[in-house]
Every structure is written in C-alpha cells, then in structure tokens.
C-alpha cells in the first residue's frame, strides 16, 4: 500500500513537471483576434517533499512567499507547505515569432514586416522578479525597437542593410533586457512587404537599370571591337613597313657586298696585271689583250645599236693598239717619275 501511494505521489508530482517542460514551452504563444501575443506560463508541480527538475530547466522556489533558491536539472528535496515552485523557466534557446506589423520609413513609406526572435533565459531569478512576463516583454520590446529602427532608414536601405538592421535590433534588445535576465541571440527579418505602388515602381526601376546595363555592355563591346580592328590594322601596317625596311636593307647589303666583291676583284686583277707587266714579253701579252677587247667592243656596238661612230683608222687595229699602248706607257712613266720625286 505504501509503495502504491508513493508511486501515485511521484506521478502527481512529476507529470506536471514533464508537461511543463514539453507543452508549456512548445506552445509558448497563442494568437488571438487582436494579433496580440499571449504567453502561457508553465503549470507548477505540487510540493510533496521533493521535485524532479528536467535538464535545461530552472525552478525558482519560494519559502513563505520569499525567494529561497533556484533548482536545476535533477532530484531536489523540498519542505512541504512552507516551500513551493513559484516560477519555471526553460534555459534553452527559444524562438519567438513576431507578428506582421507596419512601420514607416524615413522617406514616409509604409511597409509591413515580420520576423523571428531567438532568446534565452540566462538568469532565472531576474526573469522571475525583474518583469512580470519575460518573453512577452521581450517580444513587445522587439516590435517597438523594430519600428524605431525602421524610422531611421529609407526604403532602399531596409533592403540593402538588412543584416545591419538585425544587429541594431539585437543590441537594443540586449541593452533593455539585461535587468530581465534574458539574452537576445539574434533577430531575423523574414519579409519586408512594401505597398503595391512602391513595388511597381521598384520593378520599373529595376527593369530600367537592367536595360541600362545591357546598353552599356553592348556599347563597350562595340567600342572594344573597333579598338581591336584599329589595333590590328596598325599592327599590320607596322609589320608591312618592317618587312619592306628589312627587304630594302637586305637588298642594299647585297648590292654593297657585290660592289665590294667587284672592287676587290678589280683591284686584284689590276695588281696581277701590274705584276705581269713587269715580266718579260708583257707588252706582247698586253697588246694581244687590248686587241681582243677592241674587237669585242666593236662586236657589241654592232649588236646593240644601228648607228656606229668609228675612228678614222678602224680598219687598222694595230694602230689603235699602238695608240693605247702609247697612252699606257706615258701613264707608267709619269707614275715612275712621281715615285722617284717622293
């Protein structure tokens, strides 16, 4: 009989605690017709001399109406009648869904916004005695703070600087909620809904920006194509000029080499002729060579032209050869005299 009574007492004491841990936190808010958040406190267990606290929960115990202690996860003994569990808090991170509300931006545009607030109880005593309903107060503070922050920004900034807006809301809420024993971990804005007229104008503006970018890209492409064509033509002219210059240079070098070789050959021939003239019977060989060139020159004149100018003694090659040898002898004598004087 005693064991049955003890089991019943345990069930009567523990079941409300477990239900408080599950139902009281999962259904932490209800929406009514006025869209006002109403948070339900978790049901309190009976005091039968002991209490079993679930993990990540805190029970605030009062003795004769005054704060006594805070019990965390585990088995705890209590004084019947004199002590009771006054408050139950979850130490887990909790998400509070913010209802959709309207706000006016700095440029006088009315927008609708909603979001999700993530909070956690860090001091159960402050959360119990610092404010009547901690989560309710934080949710109301988040709504008023969001309206205040939106009023400082223009409509375009609310879309561009959403992360900065979230950080500003978290900082403002943490500053105000510190005496309440709660901490705001983050605030996420889900939707920012401007009026229909503003959305139409935003769509038109976005379309105009896209067309502008397309036109700019097209014009830059045409400009780059023209630049590439001009650079190609310029490079072709440069390569052509370089080729012609190289060809002229090579031709000039070839002609200079030919002239140089011809001059060297002529000088070598003259040197050998002068050496040969110093030998015996050189005059006979020279006379024979002059006579051969004389005949060859007259043969070429007959082939290249129909008009011929002949000397008076053209029928006597020996006289012409003698005349040439006489001129050569005078030149040689003159050179010898000049070399002796030197």
Image (cartoon, helix red, strand yellow):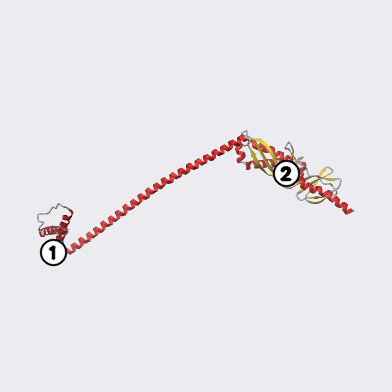
* Residue situated furthest top in the rendering: 108
Query: What's the residue at 62%, 39% (across, down)?
Result: 158
Where does the image place residue 11, in percent across and percent down from the top left?
83, 50
Q: Quadrant of residue 31?
A: top right
Disc tally is 2
Marks 2 and 1: which is nearer the front? 1
Q: CA distance from mark 2 to mark 1?
A: 136 Å
Which residue does the numbered mark 2 point to in the structure image? 182
Compared to 196, does 262 lie above or below? below
Where does the image place residue 104, in percent across and percent down from the top left?
65, 34
Q: Is residue 207 left or right of residue 333?
A: right
Query: What's the residue at 46%, 43% (across, down)?
Result: 222
Which sits in the foreground, 97 or 135? 97
Which mark, by number, is residue 284?
1
Q: Earlier in the sequence, mark 2 or mark 1?
A: 2
Which sits in the foreground, 324 or 63? 324
């Amino acid at each position: 009989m005693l064991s049955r009574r003890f089991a019943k007492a345990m069930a009567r004491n523990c079941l409300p605690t477990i239900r408080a841990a599950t139902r009281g936190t999962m259904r932490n808010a209800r929406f009514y017709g006025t869209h006002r958040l109403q948070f339900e406190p978790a049901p309190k267990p009976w005091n039968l001399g002991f209490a079993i606290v679930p993990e990540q929960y805190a029970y605030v115990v009062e003795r004769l109406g005054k704060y006594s202690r805070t019990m965390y996860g585990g088995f705890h003994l209590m004084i019947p009648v004199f002590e009771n569990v006054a408050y139950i808090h979850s130490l887990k991170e909790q998400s509070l869904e913010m209802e959709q509300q309207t706000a006016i931006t700095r440029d006088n545009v009315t927008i609708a916004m909603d979001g999700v607030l993530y909070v956690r109880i860090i001091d159960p005593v402050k959360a119990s005695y610092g404010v009547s309903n901690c989560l309710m107060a934080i949710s109301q503070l988040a709504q008023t703070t969001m309206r205040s922050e939106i009023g400082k920004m223009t409509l375009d900034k609310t879309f561009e600087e959403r992360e900065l807006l979230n950080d500003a809301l978290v900082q403002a809420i943490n500053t105000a909620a510190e005496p309440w024993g709660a901490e705001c971990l983050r605030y996420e804005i889900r939707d920012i809904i401007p009026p229909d007229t503003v959305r139409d104008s935003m769509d038109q503006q976005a379309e105009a920006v896209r067309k502008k970018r397309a036109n700019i890209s097209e014009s830059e492409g045409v400009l780059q194509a023209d630049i590439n064509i001009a650079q190609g033509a310029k490079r072709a002219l440069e390569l052509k000029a370089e080729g012609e210059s190289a060809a002229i240079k090579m031709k000039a070098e070839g002609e200079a080499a030919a002239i140089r070789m011809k001059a060297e050959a002529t000088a070598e021939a003259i040197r050998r002729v002068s050496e040969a003239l110093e030998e015996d019977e050189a005059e006979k060989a020279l006379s024979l060579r002059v006579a051969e060139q004389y005949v060859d020159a007259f043969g070429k004149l007959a082939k290249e032209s129909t008009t011929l100018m002949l000397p008076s003694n053209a029928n006597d090659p020996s006289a012409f050869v003698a005349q040439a040898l006489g001129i050569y002898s005078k030149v040689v004598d003159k050179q010898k005299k000049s070399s002796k004087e030197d």
